[in-house]
Amino acid sequence: QVQLVESGGGLVQAGGSLRLSCATSGIFFKINDLAWYRQVPGKQRELVAVIRSSNRTTYANSVKGRFTISRDNPKNTMHLQMNSLKPEDTAVYYCAADRWYITTNPSHWGQGIQVTVSA
């Protein structure tokens, strides 16, 4: 059974930092591409950051230079370090994993975790 479990969310003031983690099980972690998405009620889910099995990373323009995605293959865990947070970063954040379609239709999703940035 595949499981992705996010942790590390919460409430932070603008300018602060949070580190999200995504613990996985049931997938061949090191060959999967991984990503963080976020969603605000009433809006489409937004791709925030991707880390490929090759460790190549890409970021949404809105978070470039502030967020860092990383993976720990031996621990089957992914992280998102979020610095200089802004109120517009407030959303439910989801981790995702897929072998081929991480930017279009990931097969595996976490349950989501709330991040709230106060002004």
Image (cartoon, rainbow, N blue to C red):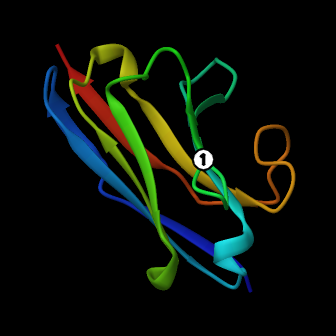
**Left or right: 93, with 102 as reference point:** left
Residue 28 in the image, given as x and y percentages of width and height: 72, 81
Residue appearing at x 34%, y 38% in the figure: 115
Residue appearing at x 80%, y 51% in the figure: 106
* Image quadrant where one finds the N terminus: bottom right
Residue 105 in the image, given as x and y percentages of width and height: 85, 45
- Marker count (numbered): 1
Q: Is residue 66 above or below residue 107?
A: above
Q: Secondary structure at mark 1?
A: loop
Q: Label 1 crowding class (10 Å Cα cut-off): few <14, some 14-19, many 20+?
A: few
Question: 69 or 47: which is nearer to us?
Answer: 69
Residue 117 in the image, given as x and y percentages of width and height: 25, 26
Q: Is residue 41 above or below residue 6?
A: above
Which of the 4 quarters of the picture holds residue 37?
Answer: top right
* Image quadrant where one finds the C terminus: top left
Residue appearing at x 52%, y 76% in the figure: 73
Question: 24 or 57: which is nearer to us?
Answer: 57
Which of the 4 quarters of the picture holds residue 32?
Answer: bottom right
**Left or right: 44, with 116 as reference point:** right
Residue appearing at x 67%, y 61% in the figure: 53
Judging by the rendered image, the residue that carries numbered circle 1 is: 56
Q: Is residue 111 above or below residue 2?
A: above
Question: 104 or 8: which is nearer to us?
Answer: 104
Amino acid under disc 1:
Arg
**Left or right: 9, with 107 as reference point:** left
Residue 66 in the image, given as x and y percentages of width and height: 31, 26
